[in-house]
Image: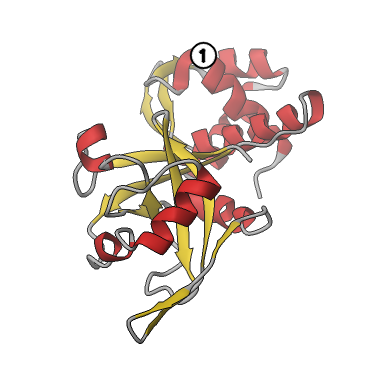
Amino acid sequence: MILPEDLQCLKEIALKGGLKGPVWVSSQSLGGALGTSPQTASRRLQSLERQQYLSRSVNPDGQYVTVTRSGEERLRHEYADYCRVFGSGREEFVLQGTVISGLGEGRYYMSLEPYVQQFSQKIGFAPYPGTLNIRLEPSSMQVRKRLDQLEWIRIHGFSAEGRTFGDARCLPCSIAGIPCGIVIPGRTHYPDDVLELIAPVALREALRINDMDEVKVEVAP
């Protein structure tokens, strides 16, 4: 768990532009901004580097520091908490991951009419026949667990031609402004760090993405 003093230091680096790229700081200047001694400021930077919240390049006259992806995610969590305190209480979740190839089953199941009708009625769009699979970064796994506490939409199973198709649950989300849905079948073959997404369009084509490309999934219940 990050210490409040470390979080304050991380925020100060971000305010200096550390989310966009390397920024130059010295222990003396950072200590002045934090109201601490240069030695304490240096320890804060070392602590953040050990926790992989920032990266450093040390030079004789100072150092260049950059907020890492994990550091950005930690700041986003802090921002979400303040939004809950001062806002309407609506909490937004952001998950980051990379595109991977799936098992190829999504195209078949998303073309079955009973499923298509339910998705159209319950989440507002008919799914493109296929799914986008994303492997979450480790820093997003805690966010993923929190999604289980939300109210998911139930998709009922059905029987057809002597075969039974199971229930599923769906959570509306978006990628780059495109409405999507996280779908979890009752019996899934994927581990918890993999998300299976549906959308009204072919996401790979619409977003021009391929395997190993990074994406952000936004959930605003």
Quadrant occupied by the C terminus: top right
Q: Relative to the observer, which residue lies in front, 26 or 84?
A: 84
Q: Relative to the observer, which residue lies in front, 76 or 118?
A: 118
Image: 151 above or below 89 = below
Q: Residue at x 50, y 73 (%)?
A: 186
Give the left or right position of residue 199, taking residue 186 as reference: left
Q: Disc 1 designates what residue?
A: 16
Give the left or right position of residue 211, taking residue 73 as reference: left
Q: Residue at x 39, y 51 (%)?
A: 197
- x, y (%) of residue 123? 52, 45
Q: Which residue is drawn at 67% across and 53% down?
A: 150
Q: Label 1 amino acid?
A: Lys
Q: Relative to the observer, which residue lies in front, 108 or 86?
A: 108
Image: 5 above or below 104 = above
Q: Residue at x 62, y 59 (%)?
A: 148
- Badge 1 density bin: few <14, some 14–19, many ≥20, Cα 10 Å: some
Q: Residue pushed farthest front? A: 161
- x, y (%) of residue 24? 42, 15
Judged from the image, the secondary structure of the residue bearing numbered disc 1 is helix
User: Would you say residue 105 is visible in this rendering?
Assistant: yes
